[in-house]
Amino acid sequence: MKEKIILLVEDNPDDIELTLRVFKKSRLANRIVVVRDGAEALDYLFCEGSYSQRGAHEIPSMVLLDLKLPKVNGLEVLKCLRSDPRTRLLPVVILTSSRERQDLMNGYSGGANSYIVKPVDFDQFIQAVEQLQLYWLVLNESPLDN
Amino acid sequence: MSLKVIRQSRIERKLLMNTILFGFFITLGITAVQFYLDYRKGIEEIHNYMEMIESSYLESLTHSLWVYDDEQVQVQLNGILGLPGMAFVEIRHGEKTIASAGKLISKSTIERTFGLTHNEYNQKIELGTLRVANDLGRVLRQLRGRAVMIFAGNTALFFLISGFFLLLFHSLVTRRLIELADRLSGIHIELQNENAEQENSEADFEKHDEMERVIIASDTMQTRISNAYEALRKSEERYRKLISQMPAGFALHEMIYDDSGRPEDYRFLEVNAAFEELTGVPTANVVGKTVLDVMPGTENYWIDVFGQVSLTGQPTRIENYSKEIGKFFDVVTYSPVQNQFAVIFTDISDRKNLEKAQQQQRDVLESKVKERTDELRQRVEESERLNRAMINLLDDLQDSNKQLKSLSSHLTDANKELEAFTYSVSHDLRAPLRGIDGFSKIVLEDYADQLDEHGRDCLNRVRSAARRMGILIDDLLRLSRVSRAELNQVPVDISAMAEDIAGRFQEDTPDRKTEVKIEKGVRGIADPNLLHIVLENLISNAFKFTAKRTNTRIGFSCDHDGKETVFRVRDNGAGFDMRYAGQLFGAFQRLHDVDEFKGNGIGLSIVKRIIQRHGGRVWAEGVVGQGATFYFTLQSEEEQQ
């Protein structure tokens, strides 16, 4: 089975650590790429800036996108992804601490595939990330797979 | 002139013809009479000559005969023959002619025979007879010559006289007759429709002479006069009917003036039937009497007005009241003859009374209008005062507005800050908690062997506290959301909503025996989402605080106390001490131990906030161990109206 890439866009090191732990513990062998702000996320996705040498074929299978990000915020990143043909169909899951209805509405309006609120309870967080991975990388048929 | 006139004038032509004819015979007659008289005179003259012969010649002739003087006899006979008219003289003795002279030519003669007797001694001796013949032809010849003269003279005389009379006649009679005939025929008395007949006779009229024309004209005139009279009679009858049957009252009067010439009274000359009807005064009592006799109370203005009309002849129309008759009259008055006046009047009392009533209504209306106008003016003044006050207020308001605007901008800033704060709470405060919990779990998992029981317990407490704080944050956010959410009030079936919520709680606790009683058909105006939160909280509380009951009773109902509708959620649960009722709705206020009943005390705060936002009130009654009742209203009655 081909190794799938998950792009984690997250600025909080604690959350990065915790999230990476969940992925590590899971049985699925996927590569996690972590970027720490919106600008870096866009550079990575469009092979620009420090990622210009990256193989263009390495398209992530899923993007886990925080909303509150330095430089370029999550919603703007989402907007860029959805307006570019290369990333238009890329599954984007918003993973955020915000329960604000406004954020939820903006996320879905911007074309997010899912909106997950990071639970305070770590047990629930593990569960959520595992389910996400299972759903989007295993169960869900992506138009980008073939 | 005369010939022409005579030729034109028929009567003169006739007269001339008749005169000529008559003159001719008269002249002839006169001539004949003269002729006869002249003839008789001639005969008489002859007889005179005969007498003269007898007296003058007879004796001498007898003597001559006696003496046989034949010569003398012949001389004497010639002497006799010399007398005028003598044609033949002869002396005979028996059959024997002794002497003769002349010749007997004409048969028409006058003859006389004288006896020639000689007296001798008283003895008469007849000597013979003298025969004398006078020729009448001479006399007739004489007469014939004179007759022409007489006839011509008579004729001339006659024509002179008759011509003079003709002229006289013409100048005195004929001309006048023609004028008369013309005038007579020129008089048009009859009415217009009889003109045709007259025009037809115009041609015939020319054929007649002046006298006849006068007669015809006078006949025509008579017809015309009688026609005209008839027409006049009819007309008069018509006008009389017109007056007498006129529904309006009519009266003709004669004005009576005082010594100074001022009108003081008037006398009725004629009135019609309607007069009696309208005035109520019998016609018989009126005519010939004066108005002050009949109606002494007659107002002066009537007499004045009528007097003016009689004097000036200016027709006038007046409307006035007659006290004597008790009616209003519309009177048209005019003066057909000097010092007389006629009136045509109608009773207008009904109209006048109506007008009076209308006027009264108008007066009332006007006074009302005036009243209202005054009122209105007062109001206007008041409103002007108010306006001034308003303007002052507006100035103040503008100041206030300015202040408000600055306040509003402050508030907007504050709201933005709140938004930012809420977002921050939502996002940033939760992340560290997740870290605390997550890393505590990692320590528990990865370093379990290095921790004793107490260490694990501590870490678990850390995790539990972190999670509780997460819940608190969520609750705070919910409260904040409720406060900020837009209010969308519509009619809501509250009963159905309560049933639905209670039903779900019953499903969640199938092991409990719960009796839920919800009043049907309770409706209200509210934001459905927020009301749902209220009911959910209250019913949730009811279920929560009745958890230890074996027989749970939960009820929803409403009461109308006339002023407002009070909704009620009641349970027979743990209840509470009324002393602490005031604290119930404060955020994070709890009356029960967390271990006894779960919850962080945010629910009722949210309920209170929502009810307040609807303009309603919320309160609670409870008895410890017997249950609690939560009351709320959605909005004050005034707002509902």
Image (cartoon, rainbow, N blue to C red):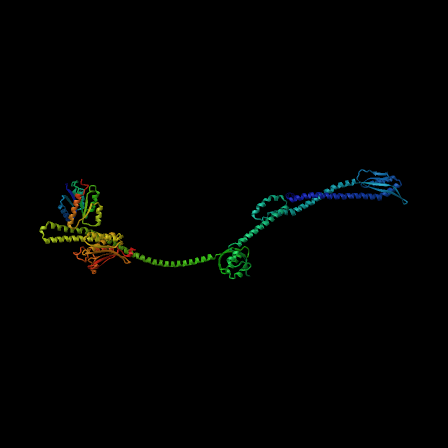
Residue drawn at x 78%, y 44% is B40
Residue A122 screen position, x and y as percent: 15, 50
Q: Quadrant of residue B30?
A: top right
Q: Is residue B473 left or right of residue B42?
A: left
Nearer to the camera, B197 or B432: B197
Quadrant showing the C terminus of chain B? bottom left
Nearer to the camera, B156 or B522: B522
Nearer to the camera, A83 or B598: B598
Residue B580 screen position, x and y as percent: 20, 60
- Image height check: is B59 above or below B584? above
Q: Tell which residue pokes out farthest to the right in this image.
A: B121
Residue B29 screen position, x and y as percent: 73, 43
Q: Quadrant of residue B378?
A: bottom left
Q: Quadrant of residue B72?
A: top right
Confirm whether residue B223 shows in the render. yes
Residue A22 screen position, x and y as percent: 14, 47
Residue drawn at x 77%, y 43% is B39
Total marks in image: 0
Quadrant showing the N terminus of chain B? top right
Confirm whether residue B414 shows in the render. no
Residue drawn at x 11%, y 52% is B456
Q: Is residue A61 left or right of residue B390?
A: left
Nearer to the camera, B9 or B149: B9
